[in-house]
Image (spheres, grey):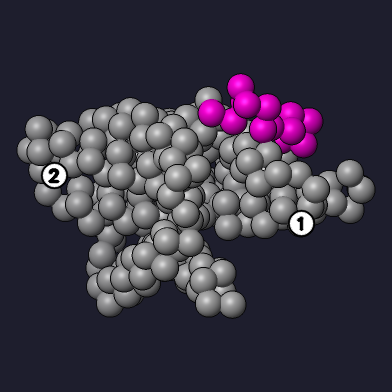
C-alpha cells in the first residue's frame, strides 16, 4: 500500500471514530476511504477491515460514556443481544437479498428521521418518563433485532437509526441515546467480525493501524459529547443524517 493511501486511511479512521462516538455514521467516512485505498480487494474484505477498525473505537466510546453517565443498561443490553444475533443473520442474507432493493427504502426512512428531528426542536433535548420495564425490554429486543439485521446486511446509518430509535421510542435524551447506541454498535461489529474473520475477510495490519486512530477519534468525540450534552449530539446527528441522505441519494439516482 502506498504511503499516501495509508495516511488517507488513518485520517479517515480518526474522523470516523469522532463522528461515530457522537452521532453514528462513521462508516460513511471509513468505508469510502477503504474502497479508494484498496481498489483490488473484495467488498467483503473492505467491510471486514472496516469492522475491525470500528469495534475498538466503539468499545472505547461506550466505556467512556459508562464511566461518566448512567448508561440505560436495561435497554442497551437486550437490544445488543438481539442485534448480535440478527447482525450475523443480516451478513449471511447478503447473498439472497439484493441491496438495490434496500437502498431506496433506507433513503426514505433517513429523510423522515431528519424531517422529524428538525421540525421538533425539543426532540431529545431532555429525557422523558421511562416506560414500564417489561415494555422497554420488548421494545429493546425488537429495535435491536431490526437494526442489528440492517447493520449486518447493509450498514449505512445504523448508528444514527439507533440513536433516533432510543430517543423516539424509549424517551431518552440524545446524549443517553448515543451512549446506548454505542453498546449495540459494539455487538453488531462483533457479530460481523464473527462472520468475516473465519472467512479470511480482514486485513489485520491495516485494520489494527486504523483502530488506533479510530480510538483516538472516538475518545475525542465522547469527551465533547459529554461536555456539551444533548444539544451538541443532536446537531452532529442532523449533519451526519444529511450527509447520509446525500450519499445514498447519489448512489440511488446517479
Specify the farthest residue to the right: 2
Q: Quadrant of the N terminus?
A: top right
Instruction: Give the SS element for disc 1.
Output: helix
Residue 200 belongs to magenta span: yes
Image position, residue 138 (x, y; %):
15, 36
Indicate whether 215 appears above or below 8. above
Q: CA distance from mark 2 to mark 1?
A: 45 Å
Image position, residue 176 (x, y; %):
33, 45
Indicate whether 246 appears above or below 177. below
Q: Quadrant of the C terminus?
A: bottom right
Indicate whether 175 appears above or below 182. below
In the image: residue 152, left or right of residue 148:
right
Specify the farthest residue to the top: 198
Task: Identify the residue at image location x=27%, y=44%.
Answer: 143
Task: Identify the residue at image location x=58%, y=57%.
Answer: 28
Q: Badge 1: how crowded within 10 Å, few (<14), some, or many (20+)?
A: few
Image position, residue 249 (x, y; %):
50, 73
Q: Is residue 208 visible?
A: no
Instruction: Give the SS element for disc 2.
Output: loop
In the image: residue 204, left or right of residue 73:
right
In the image: residue 175, left or right of residue 75:
right
Out of 44 and 75, give the one closest to the viewer: 44
Image position, residue 9 (x, y; %):
76, 49
Indicate whether 53 appears above or below 2. above
Region of the chain picked out in magenta, as a range? 195-209
**Label 2 with label 1: CB-CB less than 8 Å:** no
Residue identifier under label 2: 130
Task: Identify the residue at image location x=53%, y=25%.
Answer: 194
Task: Identify the residue at image location x=33%, y=28%.
Answer: 81
Is tag 2's residue or tag 1's residue first in the polypeptide sequence? Answer: 1
Residue identifier under label 1: 36
Q: Is residue 139 visible?
A: yes
Amino acid at each position: 500500500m502506498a504511503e499516501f493511501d495509508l495516511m488517507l486511511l488513518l485520517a479517515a479512521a480518526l474522523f470516523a471514530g469522532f463522528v461515530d462516538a457522537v452521532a453514528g455514521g462513521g462508516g460513511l467516512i471509513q468505508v469510502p476511504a477503504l474502497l479508494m485505498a484498496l481498489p483490488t480487494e473484495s467488498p467483503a474484505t473492505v467491510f471486514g477491515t472496516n469492522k475491525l477498525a470500528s469495534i475498538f473505537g466503539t468499545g472505547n466510546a461506550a466505556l467512556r460514556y459508562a464511566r461518566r453517565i448512567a448508561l440505560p443498561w436495561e435497554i442497551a443490553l437486550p437490544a445488543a443481544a438481539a442485534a448480535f444475533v440478527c447482525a450475523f443473520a443480516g451478513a449471511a442474507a447478503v447473498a439472497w437479498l439484493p441491496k438495490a432493493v434496500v437502498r431506496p427504502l433506507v433513503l426514505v426512512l433517513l429523510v423522515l428521521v431528519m424531517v422529524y428531528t428538525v421540525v421538533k426542536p425539543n426532540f431529545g433535548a431532555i429525557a422523558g418518563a421511562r416506560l414500564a420495564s417489561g415494555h422497554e425490554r420488548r421494545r429493546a429486543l425488537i429495535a435491536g433485532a431490526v437494526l442489528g439485521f440492517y447493520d449486518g446486511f447493509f450498514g449505512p446509518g445504523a448508528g444514527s437509526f439507533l440513536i433516533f430509535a432510543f430517543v423516539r421510542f424509549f424517551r431518552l435524551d440524545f446524549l443517553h441515546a448515543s451512549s446506548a447506541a454505542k453498546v449495540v454498535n459494539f455487538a453488531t461489529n462483533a457479530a460481523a467480525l464473527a462472520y468475516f474473520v473465519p472467512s479470511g475477510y480482514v486485513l489485520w495490519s491495516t485494520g489494527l493501524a486504523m483502530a488506533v486512530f479510530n480510538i483516538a477519534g472516538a475518545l475525542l468525540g465522547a469527551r465533547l459529547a459529554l461536555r456539551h450534552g444533548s444539544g451538541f449530539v443532536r446537531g452532529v446527528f442532523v449533519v451526519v443524517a444529511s450527509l447520509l441522505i446525500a450519499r445514498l441519494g447519489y448512489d440511488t439516482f446517479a
